[in-house]
Amino acid sequence: MSSSIQGARSGSTANSLRAPSFRLGERIVIGLLFGAAAISVGVTIAIVISLFAPLPGFFEYVNPWDFLTGTLWAPSFADASFGVLPLVAGTLQVVFYAMLVGIPLGLGAAIYLSEYAGNGVRKIVKPILEVLEGLPTVATGLFAVFWLKPWIQESTPFLEWTSPFSIGVAGLTVGIITIPLIASVSDDAMRAVPMALREGAYALGATKMRVALKVVLPAAISGIVASFVLGASRAIGETMVVLLVAGGGSPQLKIGFTEPAGAMTAFIASRATGEIATGTIDYYSIFAVGALLFLMTLIMNMIAIRFVNKFREVYD
Amino acid sequence: MENNNKVAGNEVFSLSNMSVHYGESLAVDGVNLPIYENEITAMIGPSGCGKSTVLRSLNRMNDLIPGAKVGGQVLYHGQDMYGPEVDPVQVRKLIGMVFQKPNPFPKSIYDNVAFGPQTLGMKGDMDEIVEGALKKAALWDDVKDRLKDNAFGMSGGQQQRLCIARAIAVKPDVILMDEPCSALDPISTFKIEDLMMELKKDYTIVIVTHNMQQAARVADRTAFFTVDTERGEGSRVGQLVEFDETSKIFSNPADSRTLDYVTGKFG
């Protein structure tokens, strides 16, 4: 403390502006916290590198254009074919049927929770939605295989149920999984709309329904659209349900509610076992599909973030 | 200031022994107040005196606050406004409101004004209704070339006049104003006051204001509220102290508390 700033009482340290100690504990904690943040970023980068690194190997065998536009996916046939469209079509069908369920039910729940439910109801319904969100998807998949699919099959005898698997039922099940996500993000967006806007509309003689649909919903639209995009991106990434309910699928491009179909995630999960030999075309194909999947969800999440930011600008 | 006594018109509202509770706590009690047709009635008083609470009970806006309960009697043209048959939505069609902070919808200027008439399914040419309301709010010349622009792009004073246009577009009977100028600059404030003087020919106006000069400038009659200090520790219950012609309230009030407030001794 010899070089401390000298106060009026020369020689005393009473007026020193220097830290009394090195504060080692605080420095260690800061270091650990930084490490935690750095590891999560580092792991993400490592995953991306590991996904993209094997791609040159794959595209040595397969023309990128044939990969993206081919309609036959048969990596293990003697006459192998690597057209990814059947898998992409499977994934997109899952997203389509999922949104058919997730958007109306998720948004409906959000409008109810935000505009109609009393505090008592909210306190019960919100935790239930959160439990549903945290349910292991393999459990939801089992529910779909042994209960939902037989039930849908029985109630729709006019459809051609030839396979034990169905991409449509898989999609609807994934839709159920996306309901809590869509409901909770949309609910937050609608509750962020200032009370003053609602009052302005009520003061003009608007009914509760009109206030909800014509004032609150449009004011929260970017947050609501973001919830749809997040739901769709969740549906793209869902693996277990698709594997259980839609099956492995055929190598051909097929579209239809009752068809079995492979999706990108389900293909990866079924193939990436310990038995696969590294450096084979089989091995490379997993990473090609994985990288494409990564790009699709990345783009969707970027769209969602743009919407959410735009929505924040309006009321901050 | 006018010296001759004003002739009171029809009573639009008649409040007798009116009170408002928020949950268990009493916010304002024992209000007896008539509000006359085609006049501007001002409610003044210190913070927490219950003037905004009384105003918001005149179009059942307090219904939106959980636990709010109105006691006593509020008559609107002789009808009990809190009777079991009364529909709050119908009440608010007839009794419009302009708020403290301008609250335009995040829509175009045109759509803001058209929202009310569309809500009520009003007949007639919507362009004419919108133009008429904007002209009455003295806003038409400012915005006629940018009706499709978002209302958030306007100045605060313009936004508040838009909210007034929005309120008069549905042709209400009464316009309630809750400190409509407190977020505005002096020039915008004068514009709104001019507008109020113009509007009282067609409407009955009730205004809550913190600004005593504003009440003195625009109001025909003024009600002075304060916090009742005789109810004991910790309670903040508002009460109506005095209601009279504005000139009387500001020059020769009957109650000493009113005199102290209007001369700036407290509040």
Image: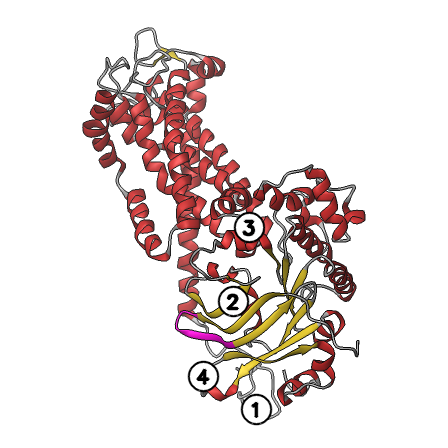
Residue A41 in sight here:
no
Tags 2 and 3 on a common chain: no
Left or right, B227 with reference to A29? right
What residue is drawn where x is 49% and y is 69%? B73
- Residue matched to label 4: B234
- Residue matched to label 2: B74
Estimate the x, y position of residue A264 in percent, counting from the top left: 36, 24
The foreground one among B46 and A153 is: B46
The answer to whether the residue labelled 2 contacts the one labelled 3, judged by CB atoms less than 8 Å apart, is no
The image quarter containing residue A246 is top left
Estimate the x, y position of residue A1 in percent, counting from the top left: 52, 82
Left or right, A163 with reference to B126? left
Q: Real-space Cα distance between discs 3 and 1?
A: 76 Å
What label sits on residue A205 in the rendered view?
Answer: 3
The quadrant of the image that shows the C terminus of chain A is bottom right
> Label 3: chain?
A
Select label 2 or label 3 by which is in front.
2
Select label 3 or label 1 by which is in front.
3
- Residue matched to label 1: A11
Query: Which residue is most to the bottom?
Result: A9
Whether residue B27 appears in magenta in the rendering, the answer is: yes
Estimate the x, y position of residue A179 in percent, counting from the top left: 36, 39
The answer to whether the residue labelled 2 contacts the one labelled 4, judged by CB atoms less than 8 Å apart, is no
